[in-house]
Amino acid sequence: MSVANRRARLQHLGFLIAVIAMPVTRRVQSLMASVIDNYDMWNDRYKWPQQGDEWSEPWGGPDPQWRHTVLPRISALLPAATILEIAPGHGRWTQFLHAYCRQLIVVDVSPTCIDVCRRRFSHLKHLEYITNDGKSLDAIEDTTIDFLFSFDSLVHADPDVINSYLSASARKLKPGGFGFIHHSNLGHYRHTLPNSLEFDEHWRSRNMTSDIFSMFCHSFGMCCLQQELVNWLSTGRLLDCFSTFANTPCSASEPASTIKNWDFMREAVNAKLDAIRPDEGHAASPGICSP
């Protein structure tokens, strides 16, 4: 087993300990990734040993993961005047997103996470912080968002939560606005899953799939443009999906462009190699908005 895989297992072990610490009834519910379980996990039980940066360890940290994995997938949609980030945790992506907009709104079900972000980014005056119910965006004005973003968070959300967020997105995004959401595709393999939680599921929703996401988009008058299925970490499944969508109607007969990326984790290897090399002076990304 590689060093990266051993470290990933150790990080996930801390997470599984938090799951096991739940009462038995909650442990069963945890397989369903409910709003209550997500609140309980990320607000109370999970210890955030490196402020969330531990989840970027296979890439060598958040900065190389941002440059090698996240930014290349959203760069065509940036900069954007107003960005909404759903489920920022302790600000792992917020620390980069804020430079690409005039206003950044972060929304999380966890009051603790919002408090951490408020303290961490107190020097930035163009950020707004909102604690929500884990599925709605009622505190945000309609047609005010240019770009909606969530990465490595809503993978734990079941279809009812994704449905609620997409319904709200259709109202909050400006006409022609875009969204990028990282979510689970584990439901595609549901018929092969055991009754107990497996290590390589990474607590993904067992009910969510790329097809369900695309169907929700169309039902709310939005267009799912592209879906990239990836094999996150050590899993032998296309466990996750990156869905890019637009607040523009299109025919349900026009399927999203689909990419099956079995080589996804090679990005992590390259990113980590880049992270340990001497600094080569990466230039600031062009087109950054000033708040």
Image (cartoon, rainbow, N blue to C red):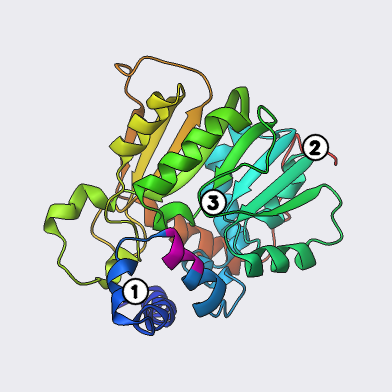
Which span of residues is magenta-colored?
35-39
Q: Earlier in the sequence, mark 2 or mark 3?
A: 3
Three-letter residue code for mark 2: Cys
Q: CA distance from mark 1 to mark 3?
A: 37 Å
Label 2 belongs to which residue?
Answer: 289
Whether residue 72 sits left or right of residue 142 in the image: it is: left
- Quadrant in the rendering for residue 21: bottom left
Label 3 belongs to which residue?
Answer: 68
Task: Answer yes or no: is residue 132 visible.
Answer: yes
Label 1 belongs to which residue?
Answer: 26
Q: Residues within 10 Å of mark 2 (few under 14, many from 20)?
A: some
Which element type, helix, strand or loop, lies under badge 2?
A: loop
> Which image quadrant: the C terminus?
top right
Contact (Cβ within 8 Å) of mark 1 with mark 3: no
Which element type, helix, strand or loop, lies under badge 1?
A: helix
Q: CA distance from mark 2 to mark 3?
A: 21 Å
**Residue at screen point 51% across, 19% down:** 248
- As rendered, which of 35 and 115 lies closer to the eye? 35
**Residue at screen point 38% across, 81% down:** 22
From the top left corner, tell me how far across and down residue 194 is, in percent: 14, 66
